[in-house]
């Protein structure tokens, strides 16, 4: 009886989370130009429009991809030294640096967005796509920083001692012992950053300065003229990509551990 | 840090310094600029100049024309920012807590599947979430249309419930209506942070051993009593901490408010955008609003920390 009730409760909650997603997916099948649910005159034409024929969506998708992968690479590269210092030294300076680097992620993004408008405005690069990439890298550096720190803490120190007794220098030990074991954590941090950058709206909305648009910004702009089913295809693409990426993290990394579950269980 | 710095060759040290400077400039200067510009002054018909005046803050609290007239418009925006964010974050934690508890009692494999599901929905952009709820709640296609088709609307009219809903602002004379309402705003905001609540409550709850629960069970406590008397006290701190984090996150909600809230119930994030990049174009005033939003967030976080600190002390 208790089991049944808890199953029903969990099912209801899953349904409430899935409901708007399902509705968006179904709306993508609409034949007409308006968004109806349930879809009228189902067709796959919207998918063709989104990926092949409509210039504006193709370009936004390209921008989204460039910004997501560019900023995630940059964030991982920038996070590695901090995470490493934090693990090796754990002194006040490295802790302060890690804290400051996580600030953009921890505070309401709208404030960081406003600040970036001024920042890029002064340097004359507001509206350049590279400034968008750097903005997202700064915003999401906290993610690889977290996964890398979790990974470094779970390293077996005896391996390092073994390397040191056999005469390995710090850089050799880093290359041959630490780096291979840290690969899954580096990848997880990278993909967390990719997915969040892909879906981020408010900061790009500020720093793109209407010079270019990503898929999320494009959807928000079209939102004022009413939804069209083509936008829903964008949503489906993004959701599928997220599920795929997290499944990969779960397959090759240890998802419950990354999210802080007890390791022994 | 100093000893490693001096023991390394010069180019290495320079690279390291440049790297640290780069991180600091990127992550800190934007916030400093917002703070500095909030004291600036807008020039009519032009941009703005640096300054050190408190006019923008005065305008925020009592209106630009004080003392001739007073206006609490922006205080009202601040109030709605805090109100929506607080209600939605408490609702999200209250409903996700029992869910996560049940989830952590499942097998490791089942837990991973649920985590993938929630991570995927967690990363879903605010834009997509609003789009989904907009279809569901809009008058022509979503639930109102469904109610009409299935006769629920008629039934509501006959039984008089429609009048009750109208008193709550959830119906027009003809049918139920969810846009624009506080209900839709808070519903969507709760939805927005629900997966975050799951991910944040997952670590503390998954660390609670089954032995603890079984011990209480053998002493004759029912499952709900166990959760109430054993589990809940163990995770009080993470529960309150989660509410705080979700609250700060929701202070920045933009799309939800723009789509679901009535213009007189808009929040600071809308007016910040209007001032910085939108129609009114008054960067210093926009910055002042952003600073106040940040201060409000900080105050709430500090209050939460103090409450938790006292809690720990009395235990």
Image: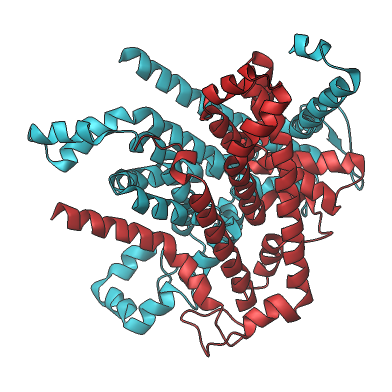
Q: Quadrant of residue A58?
A: bottom right
Is residue B243 among the parts visible in the rendering?
Answer: yes
Image mark count: 0
Residue B21 position within the rendered picture, expressed as x and y whole percent measured from the top left:
82, 26
Residue at 83% in and 47% down: A131
Determine whether, in the image, residue A182 is placed left or right of residue B83: right
Residue at 76% in and 13% down: B4
Q: Which of these two is toward me, A9 or B314?
A: A9
Q: Is residue A38 above or below residue B184?
A: below
Q: Quadrant of the N terminus of chain A?
A: bottom left
Looking at the image, which residue sits at the far top?
B3
Residue B57 position within the rendered picture, expressed as x and y whole percent measured from the top left:
71, 31
Determine whether, in the image, residue A79 is placed left or right of residue B99: right
Residue at 60% in and 63% down: A238
Looking at the image, which residue sits at the far bottom?
A41
Q: Is residue B247 above or below residue B190?
A: above
The image's colour scheme reads by chain
Determine whether, in the image, residue B135 is placed left or right of residue A95: left
Is residue A205 among the parts visible in the rendering?
Answer: no
Residue B120 position within the rendered picture, expressed as x and y whole percent measured from the top left:
51, 56
Q: Is residue B249 above or below residue B38?
A: below
Q: Quadrant of the C terminus of chain A?
A: top left
Q: Which of these two is toward me, A7 or B214?
A: B214
Residue at 44% in and 49% down: B194
In the rendered structure, the colour chosen for chain A is red
Q: Which of these two is toward me, A110 or A6?
A: A6
Give the cyan chain's letter.
Answer: B
Looking at the image, which residue sits at the far front?
A166
Q: Quadrant of residue A63?
A: bottom right
Residue A143 position within the rendered picture, expressed as x and y whole percent measured from the top left:
61, 40
Q: Quadrant of residue B176?
A: bottom left
């Amino acid at each position: 009886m208790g089991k049944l009730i808890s199953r029903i409760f969990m099912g209801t909650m899953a349904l409430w989370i899935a409901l708007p997603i399902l509705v968006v997916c179904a709306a993508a099948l609409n034949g007409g130009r308006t968004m109806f649910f349930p879809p009228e005159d189902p067709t796959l034409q919207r998918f063709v429009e989104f990926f092949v024929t409509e210039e504006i969506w193709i370009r936004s998708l390209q921008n989204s991809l460039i910004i997501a992968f560019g900023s995630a690479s940059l964030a991982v590269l920038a996070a590695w030294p901090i995470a490493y210092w934090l693990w090796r030294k754990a002194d006040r300076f490295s802790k302060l640096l890690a804290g400051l680097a996580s600030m953009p992620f921890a505070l309401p993004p709208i404030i960081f967005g406003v600040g970036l408008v001024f920042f890029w405005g002064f340097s004359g690069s507001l509206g350049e796509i590279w400034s968008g990439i750097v903005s997202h890298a700064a915003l999401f550096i906290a993610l690889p920083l977290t996964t890398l720190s979790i990974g470094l803490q779970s390293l077996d120190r005896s391996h390092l001692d073994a390397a040191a007794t056999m005469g390995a220098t710090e850089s050799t030990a880093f290359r041959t012992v630490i780096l291979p074991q840290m690969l899954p954590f580096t990848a997880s941090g990278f993909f967390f950053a990719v997915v969040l950058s892909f879906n981020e709206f408010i900061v790009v909305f500020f720093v793109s300065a209407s010079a270019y648009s990503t898929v999320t910004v494009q959807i928000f702009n079209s939102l004022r003229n009413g939804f069209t089913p083509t936008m829903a295809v964008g949503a489906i693409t993004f959701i599928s990509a997220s599920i795929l990426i997290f499944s990969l993290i779960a397959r090759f990394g240890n998802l419950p551990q990354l999210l802080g579950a007890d390791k022994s269980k | 840090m100093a000893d490693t710095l001096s023991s390394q060759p010069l180019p290495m040290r320079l690279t390291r310094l440049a790297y640290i400077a780069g991180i600091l400039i990127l992550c800190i200067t934007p916030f400093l600029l917002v703070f500095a510009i909030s004291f600036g002054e807008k020039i009519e018909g032009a941009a703005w100049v640096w300054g050190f005046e408190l006019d923008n803050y005065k305008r925020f609290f009592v209106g630009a024309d004080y003392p001739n007239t007073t206006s609490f418009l922006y205080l009202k925006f601040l109030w709605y920012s805090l109100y929506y964010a607080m209600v939605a974050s408490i609702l999200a934690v209250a409903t996700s807590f029992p869910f996560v508890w049940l989830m952590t009692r499942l097998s490791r494999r089942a837990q991973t599947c649920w985590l993938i599901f929630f991570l995927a929905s967690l990363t879903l952009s605010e834009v997509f979430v609003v789009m989904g709820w907009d279809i569901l709640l809009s008058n022509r296609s979503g639930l109102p249309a469904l109610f009409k088709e299935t006769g629920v609307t008629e039934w509501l009219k006959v039984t008089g419930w429609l009048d009750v809903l109208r008193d709550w602002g959830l119906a027009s004379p003809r049918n139920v209506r969810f846009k624009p309402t506080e209900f839709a705003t808070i519903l969507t905001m709760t939805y927005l942070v629900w997966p975050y609540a799951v991910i944040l409550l997952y670590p503390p709850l998954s660390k609670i051993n089954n032995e603890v629960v079984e011990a209480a069970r053998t002493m004759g406590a029912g499952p709900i009593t166990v959760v109430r008397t054993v589990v809940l006290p163990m995770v009080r701190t993470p529960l309150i901490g989660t509410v705080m984090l979700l609250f700060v996150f929701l202070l920045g909600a933009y799309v939800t408010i723009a789509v679901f809230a009535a213009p007189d119930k808009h929040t600071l994030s809308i007016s910040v955008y209007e001032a910085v990049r939108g129609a009114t174009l008054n960067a210093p005033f926009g910055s002042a609003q952003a600073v106040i939003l940040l201060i409000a967030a900080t105050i709430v976080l500090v209050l939460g920390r103090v409450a938790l600190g006292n809690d720990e002390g009395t235990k």
